[in-house]
Image (spheres, grey):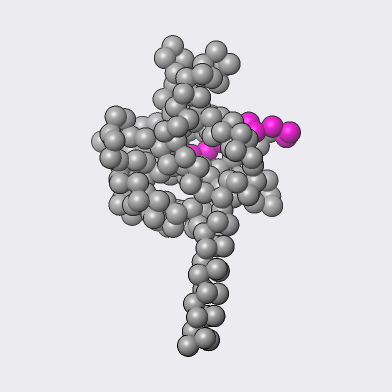
Amino acid sequence: MKNILIILSAFVLLTSCSSKKNQASNYFSTQEQDTLLTNIITYIYSPAPGANNNTKFETKYRSFYQKALPFFKIQEYYQAEDGWNYVFIIRPVSSSPIFRRGVLAKFKLKEGSLKPESFEEVINTPHLREEIVVERGGFLFKELIKKGNVDEYLSMKQYIEWPDDHLKYNKATHEWVTVKPY
């Protein structure tokens, strides 16, 4: 009986440690996480009123993205040795109080700052309940950091809504663009 309790305790300890492995708090303070997340929101959210994809990074629009901060969450984060940062964000879906969307992205940080460079949204999940987004996005995130891409899962529409045959991410304009009409 004692051996079973020791093994069970070890298992619980190992699984709880591994679940905290890809936490932003392993890399950043709470204030730094908020700054980084606000910077990422600027890339993945709608442009602020009066802004467009060319102007949304201007300082005068920053407060719009800061106000959106409570509705976004860094679910998982990983810094690779080659300088790439991988992030799994949970974000709101329009005005739905029930559904969320997962975003997996990768970027490099401008040296000495929390400003992303070479930013790319890798995938967006469909609109799902948050617990499902966490589960499916978590799986995809592990695959992304292990392989550098999730290409083999692109046909799994219950996991990945974009990219698809119709929408691709444009790294230059930081937006999803139609490549083939629906």
- Residue 9 percent location from the top left of the image: 52, 74
Residue toward you, 131 or 172: 131
Which quadrant of the figure contains the C terminus?
top left
Specify whether 14 is left or right of 91: right
Residue sitting at x 73%, y 34%? 111
Specify whether 101 is left or right of 6: left
- Place residue 114 in its image quadrant: top right
- Residue 83 percent location from the top left of the image: 68, 46
Can you see residue 22? Answer: yes
Residue toward you, 88 or 3: 3
Q: Residue furthest left?
A: 182
Q: Is residue 63 above or below residue 8?
A: above
Can you see residue 147? Answer: no
Q: Is residue 166 above or below residue 9?
A: above
Specify whether 55 is left or right of 79: left
Q: Is residue 139 above or below residue 172?
A: below
Residue sitting at x 63%, y 35%? 32
Marks counted in the figure total 0
115 inside magenta stretch: yes
121 inside magenta stretch: yes
Residue sitting at x 53%, y 86%? 3
Residue sitting at x 28%, y 40%? 98
Q: Residue furthest front?
A: 2
Specify whether 85 is left or right of 112: left
Q: Residue furthest right?
A: 112
Residue toward you, 117 or 42: 42
Q: Read off the magenta span.
A: 111-122
- Residue 89 percent location from the top left of the image: 47, 42
- Residue 175 percent location from the top left of the image: 45, 30
